[in-house]
Amino acid sequence: MKKVFLVAILIFCFGCSKNDSETVDTNPISEEEPEIVLDLVATETLGTTPFSKAWQYIVHEDILYVVDDTNTYSFDLITKQWETISDLQVEVTNFAPFLSSISFIREGKWCLFSSRGLWEFDFDLNMWNEIPVFSPDTFFNPKGFYVDNLLHFVSNANGNDKIYTYDFATNSVSEQGTFEMSGNRGEITQPVFKVGNDYFTVLYTDGFAVYKYGENFKTMELINKYNAFPLSNCSAFLFEDKLVFGLAGSATVDLDGNYLSSNISDALYYYDIEKNEFGQLPSPFSEARYGALPFAYGNEYFLMGGTTVIEEKIVTRTSIEKLTFEYVTQK
């Protein structure tokens, strides 16, 4: 009788222990879902440029057109071949800072609007001509875009919060309104984007500030701002519904041109227009660089030139790199 009772107790204990174990197993620790993020997955160098520094550029019918201090060049995006197609006439350019200008196509010609005036390049004649306009000296480093014979722009000068429109038909400029701004301005290459029917401008105002143009281009709403250092002199371009930006900073030299210091970055960031949020790409660029010129051709994305620092020496890059972006899984 005692043996039977003892066996019954052991069976009961074993059963309880087994049930407790099964209860724990039915509630496993859940794993976090993987996140899908945009990333830079490859960089390919397509060759060197025939110039040391580009001032302005535009893509038109499978050709990248570039202007430097003395010449205009074409780069066939299919054959990957460079050609010098025009010499700049000093009396026309007046050593204009083409880098600080708005580049656009109007009536089949390449136009550059800067603080020194307006020029147009005839693709058939391979020739620059100055277009007589009002004196635009007050519009330092304009940033804007061309729509329906009107040029909508802002000045990148500190303290200037006005929105302007230049009318080609009347050769006149009018003030349309003002926009919210604060802090010191800095340079951003390729600062204007069209997404659907909306236009966005990005300005460096002690941070990467994203503005959205309102109806009739008379207002600019600050919709978000990203504070990271450095971001001045960064490159920016549109990838699908995201603004990708980064590769920023600067270097300083003394009066004799000797290197003093630098603060440059290899990081890339994005702004998701639909979600109105910023983020950082997991993979950086191949080196820290600033002032590179970004452009797109079809669904391909490129960087041209820029400046880096190697062993306390400031180095100007003379290359074109193709950048490949993909959405990847990140745990």
Image: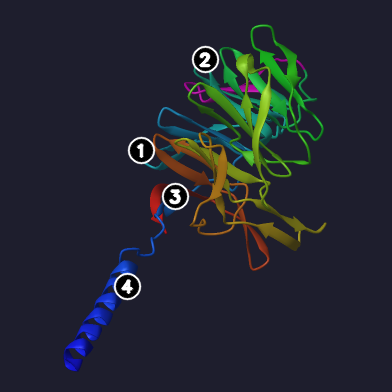
Q: Is residue 92 visible?
A: no
Residue at image location 59% in from the left, 49% down from the top: 306
Q: Which of the 4 image quarters holds residue 164?
A: top right
Q: Nearer the viewer, residue 254 or 4?
A: 4
Residue 20 got which mark? Answer: 4
Q: Residue 219: where, in percent of width, then height?
A: 68, 20
Looking at the rendered structure, the secondary structure element under dot 1 is loop
**Residue mark closest to the camera, 1 vs 3:** 3
Residue furthest out toward the front: 1
Which amino acid is tagged 4? Asp
SS at mark 3 in the image:
strand
Q: Which residue in the structure is indicated by mark 1?
A: 78
Amino acid beneath label 3: Val
Seen in the picture, residue 79 relative to 198 is either above or below; the reply is below
Q: CA distance from mark 1 to mark 3?
A: 30 Å
Q: Which residues are magenta?
A: 118-134
Which circle marks residue 107 in the picture?
2
Return the residue nearer the eye: 264 or 96. 264
Alpha-carbon distance for marks 2 and 1? Answer: 24 Å
Nearer the N terminus, badge 3 or badge 2? 3
Q: Answer with left or right where residue 57 lies relative to residue 296.
A: right
Please, what is the three-letter code of the amino acid marked with disc 2? Glu
- Considering the image in quadrants, where does the C terminus appear? bottom left
Mark 4–mark 2 Cα distance, whole angstroms, equals 80 Å
In this rendering, would 181 be left or right of 269?
right
Where residue 182 appears, x then y in whole percent? 78, 37
Q: Earlier in the sequence, mark 1 or mark 3?
A: 3
Sequence-first disc among 4 and 2: 4
